[in-house]
Image: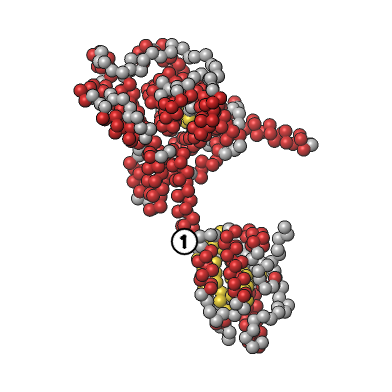
């Protein structure tokens, strides 16, 4: 087969792996009853959430409902998880709300298309597994911060007050108390009994008119002057959609026995879902952890559980009159409860009580999520977690002075044997150099590297500088036990060329000690000088060719 034919075949397999197949529904005959029950249950739960998220984002209840219907079906068909439920989510509302407030309602559909294309590109580039590198404390801190923001965003509606002018959720919630009419505060509280409120015909803000059918698909209008200002929000929404969807799919796998998920296909499916949602006038969509969990616990096992969208379609065509009378304060209550249920006290206790570094990452991620930005919070959390991980690995590394093997011989006190343990990278390399440099009255230094597990370019460079410094002081350096996986690195960085002779590399411990003793003997015979030639010693290490 030609090169072009091979490439075309590989491309075909790659594309097919990202598309749905009949195998996605192989278990439907066995699970369809549970799938239908789960779909009905999720549909009932998704209705108030879709309406609430739509209203809270500023795009309107209609936008949230359309997103739950359209994105729910598309993501179920094209996504990489058998049980993922997709639609509008609280995290997406947190990002989308300020953009809609500054650019208008129509921007929600535009951002859906832009973010959807970016998420598809991420899936096509096979970036799906990147989410596995996000540490658990970062995930939980992010979720806690999202829950706090969702709760704070609903304060003004719950007390019947206009939203505060600040874009910061906490500040805006505090500001809303300054304009509240306290005589009406008890009215929203009474909305716990929604039926009673409707019977009493209380003067409350309600959802308002909803469409009695799905709108016709059309591309949203985009002014070229707005495009530049929307690139940043689109990137943020795309990153959030990818992270939240993959985390939800990963949680779903741990809760069910429906098999693994395809991370890259999941991104493609979620990207298509957001694009379809935007074409129908909806908002960006992601995998929804809470609704996915309900789907699993209600018996959902295949993609057939996406029939929850049919329940929502039924609402659009049959019950918009009733739904339009739901008070906004009641939806705020729904979101407040949702936010509260996102916080697991047991999980918080587990993280806080684990290690100081994990607790720090968790708290800082949550605080930055609430006070700064969601994606920035994830980035800072990952950097902090990486810093603590490197510090831990660095602490586990060591430079140990060892006694020479076998019976002591005259001159052994002139030989220093150092064993490198664990990891030698930029965090521990300087410590090793300092420890070796403290040795005095030494003629030969043996550096034992067979126990060294991790070595980076900085560590190899420090070994090079250490060898050069010791050799300048007239100390012969022998290196023993370079692992094959490190040999290419130490060769290119200069460890081997810094040695006085290529025969100063060893794989055998006893041979290295014997060679060191011979150096001490010859140095004594030469009147203390160590600048003598090697006779007959051959290296057993094969150097790699560049």
Q: Is residue 78 visible?
A: yes
Q: Is residue 81 above or below residue 468?
A: above
Coloring applied to the structure: secondary structure
- Secondary structure of the residue carrying tag 1 is helix
Query: In which image quadrant can residue 492 be found?
Result: bottom right
Q: Looking at the image, which residue is at 68% across and 67% down?
A: 497
- Residue 402 shown left or right of residue 373 in the figure: right
Q: Quadrant of the C terminus?
A: bottom right
Q: Is residue 245 above or below residue 183?
A: below
Find residue 208 and report its horizontal and vertical position in percent.
36, 15
Find residue 65 and report its horizontal and vertical position in percent.
43, 20
Question: What residue is pinned by disc 1?
Answer: 395
Q: Looking at the image, which residue is at 35% across and 44% down?
A: 348
Q: Quadrant of the N terminus?
A: top right
Q: Looking at the image, which residue is at 47% across and 53% down?
A: 387
Q: Is residue 21 above or below residue 501?
A: above
- The furthest residue to the right: 2
Find residue 451 and report its horizontal and vertical position in percent.
56, 64
Mark 1, residues whose alpha carbon is within 10 Å: few (<14), some, or many (≥20)?
Answer: few
Find residue 412 and report its horizontal and vertical position in percent.
57, 82
């Amino acid at each position: 087969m030609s090169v072009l034919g091979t490439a075309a075949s590989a491309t075909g397999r790659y594309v097919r792996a990202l598309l749905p197949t009949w195998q996605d529904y192989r278990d439907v005959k066995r699970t369809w009853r549970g799938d239908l029950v789960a779909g009905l249950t999720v549909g009932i739960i998704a209705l108030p959430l879709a309406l609430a998220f739509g209203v809270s984002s500023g795009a309107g209840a209609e936008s949230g409902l359309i997103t739950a219907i359209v994105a729910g079906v598309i993501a179920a068909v094209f996504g990489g998880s058998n049980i993922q439920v997709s639609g509008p989510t609280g995290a997406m509302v947190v990002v989308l709300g300020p953009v809609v407030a500054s650019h208008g309602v129509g921007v929600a559909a535009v951002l859906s298309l832009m973010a959807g294309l970016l998420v598809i590109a991420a899936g096509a580039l096979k970036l799906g597994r990147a989410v596995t590198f996000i540490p658990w404390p970062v995930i939980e801190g992010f979720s806690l911060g999202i829950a706090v923001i969702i709760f704070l965003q609903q304060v003004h509606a719950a007390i019947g007050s206009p939203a505060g002018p600040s874009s910061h959720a906490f500040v805006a919630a505090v500001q809303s108390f300054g304009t509240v009419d306290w005589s009406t505060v008890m009215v929203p509280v009474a909305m716990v009994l929604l039926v009673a409120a409707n019977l009493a015909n209380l003067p409350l803000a309600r959802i308002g008119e909803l469409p009695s059918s799905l709108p016709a698909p059309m591309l949203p209008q985009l002014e070229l002057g707005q495009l530049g200002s929307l690139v940043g929000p689109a990137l943020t929404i795309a990153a959030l959609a990818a992270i939240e969807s993959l985390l939800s799919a990963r949680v779903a796998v741990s809760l069910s026995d429906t098999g693994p998920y395809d991370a890259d296909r999941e991104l493609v499916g979620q990207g298509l879902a957001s694009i379809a949602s935007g074409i129908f006038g909806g908002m960006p969509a992601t995998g929804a952890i809470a609704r996915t969990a309900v789907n699993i616990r209600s018996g959902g096992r295949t993609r057939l559980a996406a029939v929850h969208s049919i329940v929502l379609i039924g609402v659009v065509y049959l019950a918009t009159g009733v739904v339009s009378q739901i008070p906004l304060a009641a939806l705020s209550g729904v979101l407040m409860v949702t936010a509260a249920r996102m916080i697991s006290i047991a999980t918080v206790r587990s993280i806080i009580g684990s290690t100081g570094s994990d607790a720090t990452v968790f708290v800082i991620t949550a605080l930055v999520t609430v006070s700064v930005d969601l994606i920035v919070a994830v980035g800072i959390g990952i950097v902090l977690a990486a810093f603590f991980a490197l510090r831990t690995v660095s602490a586990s590394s060591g430079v140990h002075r060892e006694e020479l093997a076998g019976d002591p011989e005259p001159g052994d006190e002139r030989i220093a044997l150092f064993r490198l343990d664990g990891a030698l990278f930029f965090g521990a390399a300087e410590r090793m150099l300092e420890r070796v440099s403290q040795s005095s009255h030494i003629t030969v230094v043996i550096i034992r590297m067979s126990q060294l597990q991790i070595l980076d370019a900085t560590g190899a460079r420090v070994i090079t500088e250490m060898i050069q410094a010791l050799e300048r002081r007239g100390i012969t350096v022998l290196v023993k036990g370079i692992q094959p996986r490190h040999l290419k690195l130490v060769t290119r960085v200069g460890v081997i060329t810094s040695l006085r002779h290529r025969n100063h590399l060893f794989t055998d411990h006893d041979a290295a000690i014997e060679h060191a003793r011979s150096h001490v003997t010859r140095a004594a015979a030469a009147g203390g000088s160590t600048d003598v030639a090697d006779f007959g010693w051959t290296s057993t290490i094969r150097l790699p060719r560049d």
